C-alpha cells in the first residue's frame, strides 16, 4: 500500500476525478461569473463588455449592496453575542433538567424543523399592524401606545427579521452545545467538584474551555448561515421597506432575475465570494490556537 501511494501517477489518478469536479463545479462558474460581471448582459440577447464598471459601481456607488452586507454582519453579531450565549445557557439547563430533559430538548428544537415558508408567513401575520397577534396583545394589556407597523417601519423591520431568523436557528445552536456537553466525561465534573469548584467555576474553568471545538463549529455554521441568508428575507419583506432589510442573497436574486441585470448580478456574486474568503481567512486566524483534549 505504501509503495502504491508513493507512486505519483497513482496519486494523480486518485486525485484527478475530485480535482476535475472541483474545477468544473466551483472554479469554472466563478470565472464565468467574473467575466459576465464585466458585461451589461441582461440574461438574453447580445451584451457589451464594460470592463470593471460594474465592480466599481458596486464598491463605490451602490448603497444597497453595502446595506445588505451590513445587515448580514449585524445578524452575525446578534447571533454570536445573543443567540449563542443564550443557547449555551439553555443547553446547560436542559442537560441538568433530569427526567424533563428530552421534553425540553424537543420543545426548543421544534422551530428548527418547521418549514421556513411556514415560520416566515406565521411571523408576518404576528407582526401585521391590523390583525397581528403582537399588536392585539399590546392592546389587551393596556400598552396600545406601543403598537407599530413592525415590518413597515424602516427602523424596526430589520430587528424583526433578525429576531425571526435567530428564533428559528436557536434550536440548532442549542443542539450543538448540548451535543458538546454530552461528550464531556462525567469524571471531569466529579473531579472538579472534589477539588472544591463551585457551579460557576465548574462551567467557566472546566466545561466551557472543553467546549471550544464545538464553539468553533457553531461559529462557522453561524457565519455561513448569516452570509447566505435569503429565504426568510424574501418571504417576509423582500428587502423592504426601502431596502432596510436587504441581504446580499436576496439583493443578488432581485438584481439578476427580477431587474434582469444579469451582468451586474454576477459582479455582486464575485464580490460576495471575495468577502466570504476574507471572512474565512479571519476565522482561520482566530481559531488557529490549539485547545486541550480530554
Image (cartoon, rainbow, N blue to C red):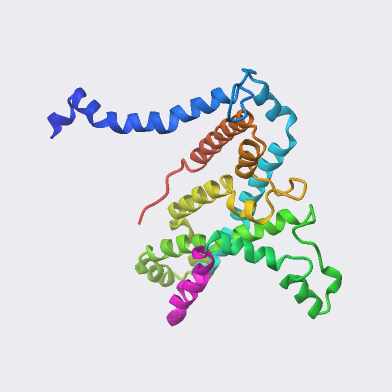
Whether residue 208 is visible to the viewer of this picture, yes or no, is yes
Magenta range is 92-114
* Magenta residue check for 7: no
In the picture, measured across the screen, residue 17 lies left or right of residue 98, that is left
Horizontally, residue 173 falls left or right of residue 162, namely left
Q: Which residue shows up at 79% across the image and 62% down it?
A: 149
In magenta segment, residue 108: yes
The N terminus: image quadrant: top left
Instruction: Return the x and y of residue 181 as percentages of the image width and height.
Output: 43, 64
Out of 62 and 189, give the one closest to the viewer: 62
Give the image location of residue 140, x and y in percent. Answer: 79, 80
Choose between 275 and 129: the one closer to the eye: 129
Q: Is residue 2 above or below residue 137?
A: above
Q: Position of residue 104 (x, y in %)?
A: 49, 75
Name the magenta segment's main secondary structure.
Answer: helix
- Most extreme residue toward the front is 45
Vertical arrangement, residue 185 with respect to residue 46, above or below: below
Q: Residue at x 82, y 68 (%)?
A: 147
Tell how many labels. Answer: 0
Question: Which of the image's four quarters has the C terminus?
Answer: bottom left
Q: Is residue 254 left or right of residue 1?
A: right
Asked where in the image residue 257 lies, by quadrant, the reply is: top right
Q: Nearer the viewer, residue 52 or 217?
A: 52
Q: Residue furthest right?
A: 145
Q: Position of residue 217 (x, y in %)?
A: 46, 51
Please give the name of the residue rendered at 44% of the width and 29% of the height, measured from the top-left corner.
27
Q: Is residue 198 among the parts visible in the rendering?
A: no
Amino acid at each position: 500500500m505504501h509503495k502504491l501511494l508513493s507512486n505519483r501517477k497513482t496519486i494523480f489518478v486518485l486525485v484527478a476525478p475530485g480535482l476535475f469536479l472541483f474545477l468544473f463545479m466551483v472554479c469554472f462558474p466563478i470565472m464565468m461569473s467574473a467575466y459576465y460581471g464585466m458585461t451589461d448582459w441582461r440574461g438574453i440577447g447580445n451584451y457589451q463588455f464594460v470592463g470593471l464598471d460594474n465592480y466599481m459601481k458596486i464598491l463605490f456607488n451602490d448603497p444597497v449592496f453595502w446595506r445588505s452586507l451590513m445587515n448580514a454582519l449585524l445578524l452575525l453579531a446578534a447571533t454570536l453575542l445573543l443567540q449563542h450565549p443564550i443557547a449555551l445557557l439553555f443547553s446547560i439547563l436542559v442537560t441538568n433538567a433530569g427526567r424533563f430533559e428530552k421534553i425540553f430538548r424537543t420543545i426548543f428544537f421544534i422551530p428548527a424543523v418547521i418549514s421556513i415558508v411556514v415560520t416566515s408567513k406565521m411571523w408576518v401575520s404576528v407582526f401585521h399592524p391590523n390583525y397581528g397577534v403582537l399588536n392585539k396583545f399590546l392592546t389587551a394589556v393596556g400598552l396600545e401606545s406601543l403598537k407599530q407597523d413592525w415590518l413597515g417601519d424602516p427602523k424596526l423591520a430589520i430587528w424583526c427579521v433578525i429576531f425571526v431568523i435567530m428564533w428559528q436557528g436557536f434550536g440548532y445552536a442549542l443542539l450543538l452545545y448540548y451535543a458538546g456537553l454530552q461528550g464531556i466525561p462525567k469524571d471531569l465534573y466529579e473531579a472538579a467538584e472534589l477539588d472544591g469548584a463551585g457551579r460557576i467555576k465548574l462551567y467557566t474553568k472546566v466545561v466551557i474551555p472543553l467546549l471550544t471545538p464545538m464553539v468553533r463549529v457553531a461559529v462557522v455554521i453561524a457565519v455561513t448561515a448569516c452570509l447566505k441568508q435569503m429565504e426568510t428575507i424574501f418571504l417576509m419583506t423582500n428587502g423592504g421597506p426601502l431596502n432596510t432589510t436587504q441581504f446580499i442573497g436576496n439583493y443578488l436574486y432581485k438584481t439578476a432575475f427580477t431587474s434582469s441585470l444579469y451582468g451586474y448580478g454576477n459582479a455582486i456574486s464575485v464580490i460576495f465570494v471575495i468577502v466570504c474568503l476574507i471572512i474565512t481567512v479571519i476565522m482561520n486566524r482566530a481559531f488557529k490556537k490549539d485547545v486541550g483534549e480530554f
